[in-house]
Image (cartoon, rainbow, N blue to C red):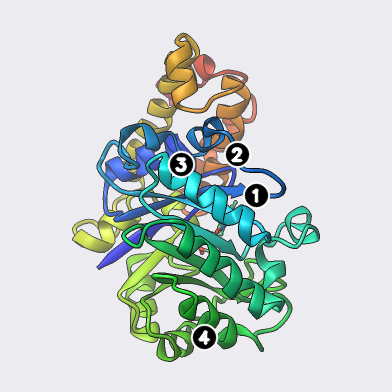
Amino acid sequence: MHIALAPMEGVVDYLMRQLLTEIGGFDLCVTEFVRVSDTVFPDSVFYRYCPELRHGSETLAGVPVHIQLLGNHPQLMAENAHKAWRLGAKGIDINFGCPARTVNKNKGGAALLVDTEILHTIVKAIREAVPADTPVTAKMRLGLEDKSLALDNAIAIAEAGAENLTVHARTKVEGYKPPAHWEWITRIRENIDIPVTANGDIWTPEDYDKCRQVTGCEKVMVGRGALTDPFLARNIKQREAIEPSADLHWLATRKIIGELANRITLAREDETEMTRVNIRDGERYLMSRMKQWLALMSKRNTLAADFFKQFRLIKCPQQLLETLQSV
Ligand SMILES: Cc1cc2nc3c(=O)[nH]c(=O)nc-3n(C[C@H](O)[C@H](O)[C@H](O)COP(=O)(O)O)c2cc1C
């Protein structure tokens, strides 16, 4: 049983990785993507995306964190991977799935899925740029507009030396529209000889069971499901409280929100801590993260949904803490 926390740009950052891995159930985290375009980044950029580099490239709960790179220039990607490794990254992941228009316009992320050869070249260049005992992994969608190259792309990535391939079972044009096509993950797994991590639409322990049954994968990655239910990974593993009551769930969720607000309030008073947790603009940062997170939690938790309505009127972490005390 191996559960990875999905990289999620704008949502799963240092703080969220800390909080979710403290709750437990996760075996691996991946940073938000670092977009490589025309330079080898200074150390500070890697520390910003992955403050865990300062403590062994692991969250405080001891879960390894890999750095994800996105870009289309093999040599530059390789040089940045080397730099990340030199700073202590436990592994390098390559993004072949991002659907964002700006990223795709610059031929990055999912846009590369029409060019099997470039996928191979990028993976190979990165594989050669870091020592063999540092895992180089990739994460792909099934294609850009259709799935015709899904198998070729997966094979190219595996043959170039990737150690693991995570497959988000949708094309770019399918966006996040359900269902995820898990049966394609099965086909990919059967055609390559590296482990495949199944990704897409695991919201409950039952989804987890079904996904594993369909795909035959030992490893899964969960993203939105883990934010909607911060106990998902732990419950998948422990099966102790598959359906915690709404009250219990909300109590725990409230604790997490309070903790996040507290940490940011504290961080704002301490420059060193601020740098460490990557908060350039504490209040705006907290509020935008909270908004995304509460929006996801509200899907499955009516108490979170009620709180989300109040949240819209809240202006700063202090007010957030006060409001939390009154609900
Ligand atoms: C807001 C958001 C940000 C994301 N950012 C990234 C990213 O930085 N890198 C990446 O490989 N995938 C990214 N993804 C895709 C997720 O990692 C994952 O593949 C997708 O959400 C499907 O998994 P899920 O159904 O468990 O959420 C992002 C998804 C969302 C919703």
User: Is residue 305 shown above or below 134?
Assistant: above
Q: Nearer the viewer, residue 309 or 11?
A: 11
Question: Which of the two discs, 4 and 2, sits closer to the camera?
Answer: 2
Q: Are marks 1 and 3 in contact (CB under 8 Å)?
A: no
Q: Is mark 4 within 8 Å of ligand 1?
A: no
Residue drawn 57% across the image and 45% down it: 295
| Alpha carbon distance from label 4 to label 2 | 36 Å
The label number, if any, that marks residue 151 in the structure image: none
Residue beneath disc 1: 36
In the image, residue 191 lies at what x, y percent? Answer: 45, 90
Q: Are marks 4 and 2 in contact (CB under 8 Å)?
A: no
The label number, if any, that marks residue 303 in the structure image: 3
Q: Secondary structure at mark 3?
A: helix
In the image, residue 272 lies at what x, y percent? Answer: 44, 15
In which quadrant is the N terminus drawn? Answer: bottom left
Quarter of the image where ligand 1 sits: bottom right
Q: Is residue 136 among the parts visible in the rendering?
A: yes
| Alpha carbon distance from label 4 to label 3 | 37 Å
Query: Who comes first in sequence, dot 4 or dot 3?
Result: 4
In the image, residue 289 lies at what x, y percent? Answer: 56, 36
| Alpha carbon distance from label 2 to label 3 | 43 Å
Mark 2 closeness class: few <14, some 14–19, many ≥20 residues within 10 Å: some
In the image, residue 225 lies at what x, y percent? Answer: 45, 58
Q: Disc 1 residue type?
A: Val
Mark 3 closeness class: few <14, some 14–19, many ≥20 residues within 10 Å: some
Q: Disc 2 residue type?
A: Phe
Residue beneath disc 4: 184
Residue beneath disc 2: 41
Q: Is residue 8 among the parts visible in the rendering?
A: no
